[in-house]
Amino acid sequence: YLEQEKIKDAINSFRIYLQSNPQNKEKKIDACFRIADCYYLNQDNNILAIQYYNEALKLNTDLNDKALFYLAKSYGYNGELDQKISALKELLKDYPSSKYRMNSTYELARCFVSRAEYDEALALYQLYVSEYPKAINLIDSRIGIADLYYKKTDYAQAELEYIKILDEFEKVRDICEK
């Protein structure tokens, strides 16, 4: 409860600051991100997180890729899959060197799986695996590839992918549980 009150006080303080129409762009962007991040982390009001990430985007700074990534995540938490996909696509297209590229690729693949757009999801998982061979979601992505072949009724390729996963990751204890 106490932490929640501190967060609300922080949000109110930053909102008051923004209402003063500050001229310092760096401080303004910082305030927008802090407000949006508070709403995002608490997930108690994703609409306001979306609003403040959009405000950060309007300021057009070198943090736009960060704003797009967390905007996409907020859309996802709010159940707005089309908007999430749109934000992730924009990030991948406009910010090829972004540190959020890896996670955006993975998130976008998952979005396409949930919409049953298997060809798009497969291409993104394959891209993820080839570009990020040491990523934390590598095994999940490889399993995603195998699962997608299965869903596309390419059972021979699905079996081949599952066998490759088991061969390559046999020392990972929980691989069979996934």
Image: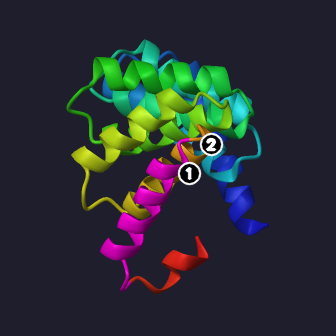
Give the vertical position of 30 relative to 132 (above or below): above
Residue 58, how many percent across, how many down?
45, 13
Query: What residue occupies the far front of the structure in this picture?
Result: 156
Give the vertical position of 162 relative to 69 (above or below): below
Q: Amino acid at mark 1?
A: Asp
Residue located 69% across and 65% down the image: 3
Kindly tell me whether residue 24 is visible in this rendering: no
Mark 1 crowdedness (10 Å alpha carbons): few <14, some 14-19, many ≥20 = many
Check residue 147 in the rendering and tell me which mark sits there, or answer none.
1
Q: Are marks 1 and 2 in contact (CB under 8 Å)?
A: yes
Q: Amino acid at mark 2?
A: Lys
Residue to which mark 2 is pinned: 151
Q: Determine if the magenta segment contains residue 63.
A: no
Label 1 and label 2: CA atoms lie apart by 6 Å
Q: Does dot 2 land on a helix, a strand or a loop? A: helix
The image quadrant where one finds the C terminus is: bottom right
**Magenta region's main secondary structure?**
helix
Residues shaded magenta: 154-171
Residue 163, how many percent across, how many down?
41, 67
Residue located 55% across and 44% down the image: 148
Q: Is residue 15 left or right of residue 88?
A: right
The quadrant in which residue 67 appears is top left
Compare residues 172 and 155 and report the one nearer the observer. 155
Q: Does dot 1 land on a helix, a strand or a loop? A: helix
Residue located 40% across and 33% down the image: 123
The image quadrant where one finds the N terminus is: bottom right
